[in-house]
Amino acid sequence: MIEHIHIPKIQDADLKDKVVLVRVDHNVVKKGVIYDPYRIDATIGTLYHINAKGGKIILMSHIGRPKDKKSGRIAINEHTSVEPIVEYLESKLHINIKIPDFYRDHEKGYLGIETSVNHLIKELKSDKIDCIYLPNTRWFYGEESSDEDSDRFARQLAGLADVFVNDAFGSWQPHTSTTGVNKYLPSYAGFLMQREINNLDRIYNPKRPFVAVVAGSKFDTKIEPLYSLLEKADHLVLGGVIYNAYLCTKYGISIKGVSEDDTMLAAEFVKKCNEFPGKLIELPYIIESDTIEGRFENQFRVRDIRYLEKEQELNYVLDISSRSFDEEYVKRIFSEAQMIFVNAVMGLTPHFNEGTLSLDQLIDENSNAVKLYGGGDTMQELKRLLPGLYIVALDSPSYYIFTGGGAVLKAIQEDSVKGLAPVKALLANNN
């Protein structure tokens, strides 16, 4: 697909002696700690290319959610700092990286890029330092603003460099650093962005049978992609709260913790499923728990959905039992699949791992299928539960792990990678 949409690519850019502003998705820090550097490592090819072609690199990424939704206040602190990323890159690549600092407003965070950064750019151009890493983009008031504030921040970012490269596939939201800078600089897709788009094409044009597995904690964030997958996939499997909401609606039961909003959306989804008979595969064995605090003896049990009674009330349903994946029809569907897309953690982590573990093992038994994993929690749990398989998957041609699960679902929902705002911005820059 990348050739068909004619996206401007970094390999076509003149980078010699140019300052190159690179938007990456290094959002891997939680409370100051990096738990998995996969997203960082996935961008190193782009950074190496820029360096090899004589470019000088300025990096930027968002980290976490420092902006309070209710008050609008932006909190600048160590929990959402890029410092752990800089330390990781310096150690891994043996380079010297500097982070500029700016005036901090108590409510609005950084108000903008200040001229104090110019001395670091001089050091970058004279090879006294190897790279500049801007502070968390979400610390800047203009990042998630609109109109004049956003445009002013975009102009300030563009003023730092000669070329813009977007290698942040996972950052699909239309924020200033992903969609605004393109207006003012020659802009290109990095190698990771290109690779993610190419692998998205495998979902748009899947080998069949195509099985999709999606789980989540809220129906409203998944409903539109689920509608698209009902049409695209040969079989769809659900997990998590969205499966619980589906069961509540389908069987007329109640499950503790499932909101009324979720069941209302699930009711519409059940109607949609009726238009595609046989596509949605119900996993029959679920795990009910009396508490969400942990998996405690005598406080959880396996339920068979085929024996649920209308108006029955269940406690928390926190996982899919491994017995579901021993069912012959479930095993057959996964064993016959030629492509499997997974954006799913089946149980409530960290205590309820049975469903996720059984799912990933069953998928791995199919040596013929292309296996595409969404990023985020899906990737983290694969690494935690099956570290050996995770390491194999990173280099196996039959696996691909996307760096952004949300971005993949958004692209599926839009039915085109051009529906992602940062990709659309790159295309607009190329026209």
Image (tube, rainbow, N blue to C red):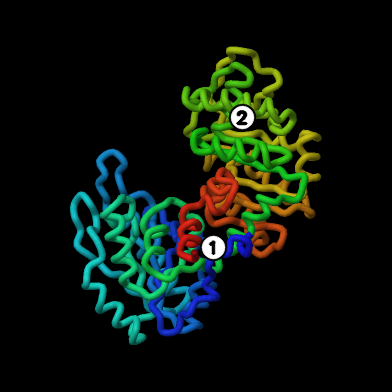
At label 1, counting other C-alpha atoms closer than 10 Å, the crowd grade (few under 14, some 14-19, many 20 or more) is many
Image quarter where the N terminus lies is bottom right
Q: Is residue 267 above or below residue 325?
A: above
Q: Is residue 278 above or below residue 413?
A: above
Q: Residue at x 43, y 71 (%)?
A: 186
Residue behind mark 1:
193
Q: Residue at x 49, y 66 (%)?
A: 430
Q: Is residue 130 above or below residue 74?
A: below
Residue 80 placement: quadrant: bottom left
Do we see residue 380 in this rendering? no
Which of the labelled discs sits on residue 287, or is there none? 2
Q: Residue furthest bottom?
A: 126
Closest to the camera, between mark 2 and mark 1, is: 1
- Taking the image as shown, residue 219 lies to the left or right of residue 230, namely left
Which of the labelled discs sits on residue 428, or is there none? none
Between 84 and 263, the one lying in front of the other is 263
Report x, y in % for residue 190: 52, 68
Q: Disc 2 residue type? A: Ile
